[in-house]
Image: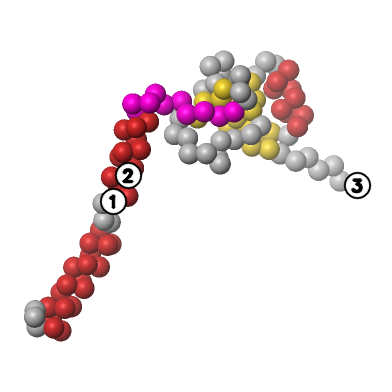
Amino acid sequence: MENKTTNKTVFEVDASGDVIGFFIMSESEITLATEEGRRIIREGWHSQRIFKPKYDFESNTWIEGLDPVKLQNKLQFIEKQEKTPTDEELNAVAIMELTQLVLGGGE
């Protein structure tokens, strides 16, 4: 019988909860790492929109590590980008307008 180990993606954080790195580890590697005093977190934050993930040891959850001002600036920047037409969209509008001029005579 074959011995199959299931590897998991885990995150290592420092004492303040900031991500140091992410690794793929087996259960035995996770156990060894935690015995060595490393802070290994098994669950990610991927179901949340977090720009700077930070692990909160009190609530055992991932939280946003950006300060509120930087977070607000980031969200405003993203909103502005989403409203700005892409080059492809601008080209499509220009082609439609040109087509109307050529075929419709500009009326």
Q: Count residues near mark 2 (Cα–Cα under 10 Å), then give few for <14, some for 14-19, many for 20+.
A: few
| Label 2 secondary element | helix
- For the residues marked 1 and 2, what is the alpha-carbon distance in whole angstroms? 6 Å
Residue 38, percent from left and from top? 65, 19
Q: Earlier in the sequence, mark 2 or mark 3?
A: 3
Q: Which residues are magenta?
A: 61-70
Q: Which residue is mark 3?
A: 1
Residue 46 within the magenta-colored segment of the rendering: no
Of the residues tagged 1 and 3, which is closer to the observer?
A: 1
Dot 1 and dot 2 residues touching (CB under 8 Å): yes
Label 3 sits on what residue type? Met
At a point 62% along the width and 25% down the height, the residue shown is 60
Is residue 68 a member of the stretch shown in magenta?
yes
In-image side of 44 versus 87 (left or right): right
Q: Which element carries disc 3, helix, strand or loop?
A: loop
Q: Which mark is residue 83?
A: 1
**Coordinates of residue 88 in the picture (x, y in percent):** 28, 62
Mark 1–mark 3 Cα distance, whole angstroms, equals: 57 Å
Q: CA distance from mark 2 to mark 3?
A: 55 Å
